[in-house]
Amino acid sequence: VIAALGNYFEIDTIQGNKGFTSWQILEQIKLKGAISDTGKQHLDEALTITAELRLHAYHHNFAQKEWISACSLIKGGFKNVNESLKASNIFHFKDTHILHHFYYIILRLQYILQNYPGNEAIAILKTDSIFEDCDFNKSKVHMRFLEYTQAKLYLEKAHIHEPENLRI
């Protein structure tokens, strides 16, 4: 996604003989005034979380392999694993709150890019925080982590407080 944004904003991703990192691409986009300070900060955080996730996967796999799967849990008795441990076992994080934070950033970015045509999306990125932890997004994140009790709770809250977000 960051590379695609770099391409869209015509960021020359080659610096001498080396390519820009995703963080450098974001900095160049920010220098062009194409994203807000807070939006850049949130995208930097999302990149950092993905880097940490990758390192956890490498450590768990005892190699530089990015294999993350729930299949091994299913074979080993997935039904016996406490709901709160499912995501942490798959992603190798003891606490999944950092992953929730990641999704609140990515879900907002995804919403902007999917629901607004090119120039309108670009205008939004200039001022948007690129972060949304509304009840509806909280329910979607809990569903992704198979935490259905929490997902239902936030979906019920969204139904009351954010009916405009309940789009099918």
Image: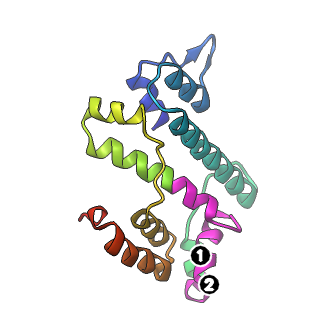
Q: Which residues are magenta?
A: 76-103
- Residue bearing the label numbered 2: 81
Q: Amino acid at mark 1?
A: Lys
- Residue 86's tag is 1
Q: Position of residue 69 (x, y in %)?
A: 56, 65
Q: In percent of the image, x 51 and y 70: which residue is there?
A: 145
Q: Secondary structure at mark 1?
A: helix
Q: Earlier in the sequence, mark 2 or mark 1?
A: 2
Q: Position of residue 135 (x, y in %)?
A: 43, 67
- Residue 9's tag is none
Quarter of the figure with residue 164: bottom left
Front one among 43 and 74: 43
Asked whether, in this view, residue 149 is left or right of residue 47, the answer is left
Q: Amino acid at mark 2?
A: Val
Q: CA distance from mark 2 to mark 1?
A: 6 Å
Contact (CB < 8 A) between labels 2 and 1? yes
Q: In percent of the image, x 54 and y 29: which residue is there?
A: 26
Q: Is residue 8 magenta?
A: no
